[in-house]
Amino acid sequence: MAKPKLRPRRDAMVPSPYQEARDELFQQIMQCGVIGCHPDDQKEWFDSTMEYLTGRYPEIKAPEIAELRTLGERFAQPTRKQAQEAAAV
């Protein structure tokens, strides 16, 4: 007798809008070279990117957008090793 094939649950396969926006933000940070930029440039980039994400994902509320920005800013910080090497030079 053959084993029945297990199907993945549909609700487990579909990410929430928040998860999609978070993943998109992280991808943009990596592609746009924001990591290690001057803080003023990062602020400007995050301002425009968060405005874009707010329009792209209208179902995400303001507190979640603020949380996304915090996550993105943390993600865009250089690693501690790089920061220590830059301080030593």
Image (tube, rainbow, N blue to C red):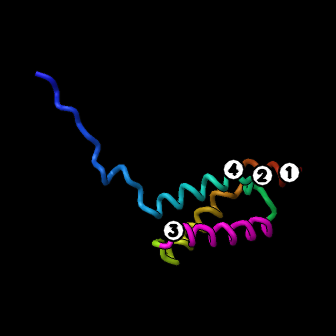
- In the rendered view, would you say 2 is above or below 84? above
Q: What element carries label 3?
A: loop
Badge 1 crowding class, 10 Å Cα cut-off, few under 14, some 14 to 19, many 20 or more, is: few
Q: Name the residue under label 4.
A: 31
- In the rendered view, would you say 31 is above or below 58? above
Q: What element carries label 4?
A: helix
Question: What kind of residue is marked 1?
Answer: Ala
Measured in 3D between alpha carbons, the distance from the residue under mark 3 to the one under mark 1, in whole angstroms, is 42 Å
Q: Name the residue under label 3.
A: 57
Question: What kind of residue is marked 4?
Answer: Gln
Q: What element carries label 2?
A: helix
> Residue 55: where, in percent of width, then height?
57, 71
Q: What residue sits 36% from the left and 49% below the top?
A: 13
Give, as a single range, the part of the protein colored magenta: 39-58
Q: Residue furthest left?
A: 1
Q: In which quarter of the image is the N terminus?
A: top left
User: Disc 2, disc 1: CB below 8 Å?
Assistant: yes
Q: Mark 1 points at which residue?
A: 88
Measured in 3D between alpha carbons, the distance from the residue under mark 3 to the one under mark 4, in whole angstroms, is 20 Å
| For discs 3 and 1, the disc positioned in front in the rendered view | 3
Q: What residue sits 62% from the left and 62% below the top?
A: 72
Q: Looking at the image, is mark 4 or mark 1 earlier in the sequence? A: 4
Q: Is mark 1 on a helix, strand or loop?
A: helix
> Residue 34: where, in percent of width, then height?
73, 57
User: Disc 2, disc 3: CB below 8 Å?
Assistant: no
Magenta stretch: residue 43 in it? Answer: yes
Question: What kind of residue is marked 2?
Answer: Gln
- Secondary structure mostly seen in the magenta stretch: helix
Q: Please tell me the numbered disc located at residue 84.
A: 2
Q: Looking at the image, is mark 4 or mark 2 earlier in the sequence? A: 4
Measured in 3D between alpha carbons, the distance from the residue under mark 4 to the one under mark 2, in whole angstroms, is 24 Å
